[in-house]
Image: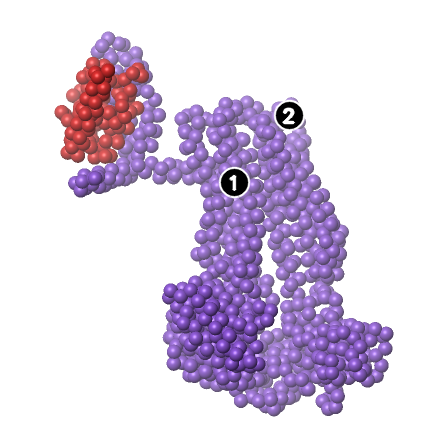
Chain colours: A red, B purple
Amino acid sequence: MPGNNELLHGTLELLILRVLRASALHGWGISKHIREVSRDTLQINQGSLYPALYRLERQGMIAAEWGTSDEGRRAKFYTITPVGRTQLATEETEWRRFALAIELVLTSA
Amino acid sequence: MISPSKRRRGVVLSIIYISTGIRQWLDRRRFERDMDDEMRFHIDMEARDLVSSGLSADDARARALATFGGQARFKEQARLDLPLHWLSDLRDDLRYALRSLRRTPVFTAVAVLALGIGISANTTLFGLADAAAFRPLDVRDPDRLYAVAGRQNDGSPLTLSYPTYQDIRGGVPAFADVAAFTERMVSVNSDGTPVGAWGAHTTDNYFTLLGLRAVAGRLTRSGDHDTPVTVLSHAFWRTHFGSDPAIVGKAIRVNGAPFTVIGVAPPAFSGTRLFTFAPALWFPIGMHAQTLPGSGDLLHFRERGRFHLLARLGGGARAESARQQLGAIADQLAREHRGAYGESGLLLLSNRTAINPWLAPPERLKMIGLLSLAGGWLVLLIACADVANLLLARMTTRGREIATRLALGASRGRLARQFLTESAVLAALGAAAAVPIAMVALRASQGLAPPLDFAPAFSPVLDGRSLAVTVGIALASAVLFGLAPLLHALSPDLARMFRGGPDNQKPATNRSRQVLVVAQVATSVVVLAVAGLFARSLDAARRIDVGFDTARAIAFSVDPSLLVGYDQPRVDELYRRIEASLGELPGVQSVARASSIPLDGTTWTARIFAGEAVPTTQAIVADCFFVSPSYFTTLGVAVAQGRPFSPADTAGMERVLVNETLARRLWPSGTMGGGARVWLDSVGGSRVEVIGVVRSHTSRQLGDRPRALVWRSLERNRVSRTTVIVRATGDAEPLIPGVRRTIQTLAPDLAVVGLRPLREHIAVAYSAAESAAIGGSVLGVVASLLAAAGIFGVVAYTVSRRAREMGIRSALGARTSHLVALMVRSGLRPTAVGILAGLGIALAMPGGMSAILYGVSPRDPVVLVGASVLFFIVAAVAALIPAWRGARVDPRRALQLD
């Protein structure tokens, strides 16, 4: 994994929640989705992804359930909880404000 | 500002977090399985994706695996994220520690033994020091309790009179209340057999002031001042009344007068003063005519200062204001009662603990207590050093294991915790071993006290306090001895450990290890030698001629003046009848009485001056015995010159006998002549005639040089409590029941105290020598065992360091015995140095030693050689065990270590 796309601390959680807002997904699906949407810019290290999932689950932001994947295999699906939705809204706002601030600084110079 | 709704949300989130955490932890096995499944799924999907982009199945799989990264590693990461993961880690650590300790049973046994000794020494010493100096009285607010005493000119405390007590009770507003008490033996008769018991005679506010509650019935309270009631101590209730609750309301006879038992005091309460007897009964002071007969009116005379005062500081009052108010009272008393009032001021002493303020300042006793605790810490330190050495030795052989675990991804922190757990387990085992040792030691320490007529108010027990200290000490020791191996394990030289080869430790550390062993060995040899000297001294003391015939005789003491209604003529009459009746018992040869008998722990003294008209010598202080005429023949004391007392000596000038030691000092020229006269007590005091000289014998302690002794007539100098000696024609012990019955017939309420063979009476004279011998032996064993553990550690360390060398030697054909000898030498070299040093110290021991030894020289060769040989054997065993185990290691395995 290239060093230039290290995620900012706490951003991974935001991305996971955002991905899950649309539909329930398994871990691999989440990682693939992020990779594809970001056009391969963001590659999630599995060593971070799963601990983050467990952490979010423990925080009550997401819930996990075993189900069957599109390929017909047993897989663990994660869904966002109401608590997670509220959190996502807060963090999204925060992130946009942050990104805007960075943008402002970069364009000012 | 955090809004309430946000805070509420925070609370909800934490609850979810914790509950999920607990659920996950409880369900952690499934959690692990789920993780595995999930990862497998992930890798499979990734591989499938790669295959569809054109890779071969095998390549795709390999690539997927590689992308995923170390599964084990991130599973560990996820596991660490579990909120309660440390709980399962702890369990794993414990299991691992136990397994690894079980793998090395000899090491574990030696370490646990050393720790058990070190910790139990602390538990025992704490138990003793706590009981003696620190444990607060088990009463309400002991912090606010004070003792008040008169102040003598030299600053020492003095008991006070009842009127003074009343002045203080009414004149010190800083005190919430003040109680007074005095103590003396009473004769208690509940079932026809009177027993002597220690009685406390208190004001009726005593128990209320202490804030105590009765276990059964009630305690004395305001209004009981002059009612014939008594409160039993819990111990007396148990031993004399079988803990019968129905005793409340029953009548017993005290000194012949009827009293009603109203209640039982709580078990933890044995009076407010240590180092005296524990009261068995409490009486209201208004009944003192019955409970303290012969003491006159105690309540109305200022010169009869017999009372100990116990005061409770009022809420909010300060000790300083109480002291000032006491000062004012003292000044007023000094003005108003000049002469009748001997005190110079009043003392306010802390009475928070049962430390007897009359014996020594509590501060000094606390200091002594602290010093003995420090002694315990020293023992623990040595034990910890031993165990640290052992752990280091073991660590060397475990280098590979440590390195492997580090390489497999265990963090150093995790390893550190692992080693700490191991140390903690060892310390816990040590503490578990220490508790029974301490229990035995504490019980034995009470057995070391000389035989007394009443139970002392000193009860060292293994209670919650000492157990808490044991746990604390064990934890502290775990840190102490666990530190060295911990630092070793965390040293960055991973590669070296992985090789598992000999670590080239700086010789300095090894030398310090050897110095420690040398010091331990030297100490052990000295302590063993001292123990040996005490033992031989005791043996010699037991075999010496005490100067009188201790066989075929029994003795007991009585005090008829205790009985209500026994004035002097009646006491005299009772004594006459006792002597006559006992003399008529079959099997009795003769009966005598004395104020005390030699070597029984009681001594009176007298001052004697030689000279005719005026004294020609300085005062000679002599031990004094008041005896009946038949004393010398009954006890079998030889009168060397002159004659013993005769019944005719009751008239005319008082006559005395002296022993040879006193005679030599009175008449250094050697001629005493007939009708020699001396002054007794003071110049111009009693003029007495010396009628005989008695062969010198020891009188106080066995092994003493004979002291100056004088015998005076009991008929002419009455002593209320006397010892009666009964000499039998044959075996004396069968006479005991008959003697008891005879006394009971003559005086049904008179307690017979200490009725036992004469030999046992003088046992008190051996007790110091016995305590020294036993205490010395215990210390010797402790020191030797610790030193042995040290030697074991040194040899074990050598063995572990030179394992490879031994393997090579063995492979090259060296004999096992040769290898053992090689390694044993590493332990025996410091042993030899230590023994020599110990012998040097023992030989250089100050001449003061000979003063406390009897019949044996402090340089007794048998003892010195014996101690050295004994210790050498211990050391050899301690060195042989690890050496033998080391030498037997399969050379192939030893070589593989490289």
Q: Earlier in the sequence, mark 2 or mark 1?
A: 1
Mark 2: which secondary structure?
helix
Q: Label 1 lies in what chain?
A: B
- What's the residue type where badge 2 is placed? Arg
Number of numbered discs on residues: 2
Label 2 environment density (alpha carbons within 10 Å; few <14, some 14–19, many ≥20)? some
B752 relative position to B845: left or right: left
Q: CA distance from mark 2 to mark 1?
A: 33 Å
- Circle 2 sits on which residue? B809
Q: Label 2 lies in what chain?
A: B
In the rendered image, the quadrant that contains the C terminus of chain B is top right
Quadrant in which residue B393 is drawn:
top right
Quadrant in which residue A49 is drawn:
top left
Q: Which mark is residue B888?
A: none
Residue drawn at (62%, 47%) of the image: B784
Tell me where residue B84 appears, x and y as whole percent. Answer: 32, 38
Q: Which mark is residue B481?
A: 1
Q: Is residue B404 above or below residue B423?
A: above
Mark 1: which secondary structure?
helix
B169 relative position to B824: left or right: left
Label 1 environment density (alpha carbons within 10 Å; few <14, some 14–19, many ≥20)? many
Q: Nearer the viewer, residue B427 or B815?
A: B427
In the rendered image, the quadrant that contains the N terminus of chain B is top left
Residue drawn at (39%, 68%) of the image: B314
Instruction: Tell me if I can see residue B663 in this picture.
Output: no
Residue drawn at (79%, 73%) of the image: B665
Instruction: Tell me if I can see residue B769 in this picture.
Output: yes
